[in-house]
Image (cartoon, rainbow, N blue to C red):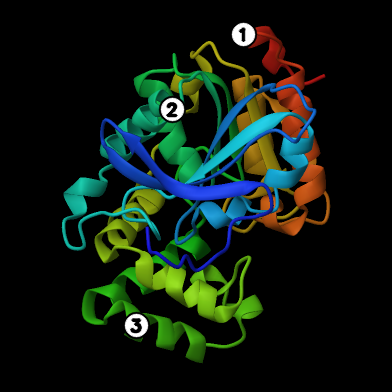
Amino acid sequence: MTSRPAFPPPPGARAYLLRTARGEFAVVDSSPAAGEEGRGVVLMLPGFTGSKEDFRLLHEPLAQRGYRVVAVDGRGQHESDGPLDDESAYAQRELARDVLAQAEALGGPVHLVGHSLGGQIARAAVLLDHSPFVSFTLVSSGPAEISVSQQQRVKLLRDALAVLSMEEVWEAIQAMGPPEEVGGPARGLGDQDQLRRRWLGHSPAQLLATGRQLCTEPDRVAELAAVPLPFHVLSGAHDDTWPVALLDDMALRLEAHRTVVTGAEHSPNADRPIPTAHALADFWDGIGPGPSKAAAGTP
């Protein structure tokens, strides 16, 4: 982690390196608000080109509900170290094993939350070993590969990374138009200098490997449904990465609690953080002291 982080942590949170059996990972960690009884620990995994800061607006409202929130940069993401040119280090199984190590370092069991790509990595971790987790929430993360239109965008990015430096790719993204239209790494919770520094912190190999994963991920919902954990599928009302109808169907297949956040798109944690935080905490509050498949059912 750099001595001067691009993003100051939100109020009541601290940024540090979490030591695990698989190395150190940059995290932002917030504790329950003063006077609130601790109700559990949450581990949050960001999406493609994202970072732990994508959850920054959830820390305070979840702390008010009594939850400790730990948002993490995965291997090669933003402020977590990783090889720059070895894509094999970012195989999904390797990233999943990192998640298990992070949960262990936090003392487990934890509520696991994965946004987009982070949801698929989290799913791989749960399928390897579900014992470190109390529940699993997929935020805007679908059953298999991303939509054709998003696959085309990822391919464009991967082609650019094959011939240009990270700085040159950033300049090319900026030249494409306003951030709200271009999206991707140029859009997020921060100004353009902060988002540029985040982009430059990513390992090109991590982006190449995980971009390929997003475009080739198989449907593993049936495997996941056999795991004895409460599931929650949360999304915005519109999503062009995985159509909302596809997320609805996945929730049915998982017998999962389902939340659709009105007024939000692919990143409800950024678009509508307060209703997103309330939906997450309501789900966790309803689980009780231990995992139970029955607790996952939609009311």
Label 2–label 3 contact, CB within 8 A: no
Q: Which residue is mark 1?
A: 290
Kindly state the secondary structure of the residue where label 3 is placed: helix
Relative to 153, residue 231 above or below: above
Residue at x-position 20% and y-position 54%: 87
How many marks overall?
Answer: 3
**Marks 2/1: CA distance?**
16 Å
* Farthest residue, direction bottom: 175
Which amino acid type is marked by label 1? Gly
Which amino acid type is marked by label 2? Ala
Which amino acid type is marked by label 3? Glu
Please state the horizontal and vertical placement of residue 277, each as a whole percent of the image.
75, 41
Q: Nearer the viewer, mark 2 or mark 3?
A: 2
Kindly state the secondary structure of the residue where label 1 is placed: loop
Residue at x-position 68% and y-position 45%: 59
Could you classify mark 3 by the number of other residues whose Cα lies within 10 Å: few (under 14), some (14-19), or many (20 or more)? few
Q: Which residue is mark 2?
A: 103
Residue at x-position 74% and y-position 29%: 66
First in residue order: circle 2 vs circle 3: 2
**Marks 3/1: CA distance?**
47 Å
Kindly state the secondary structure of the residue where label 2 is placed: helix
Residue at x-position 49% and y-position 56%: 51
Q: Which residue is mark 3?
A: 167
First in residue order: circle 3 vs circle 1: 3
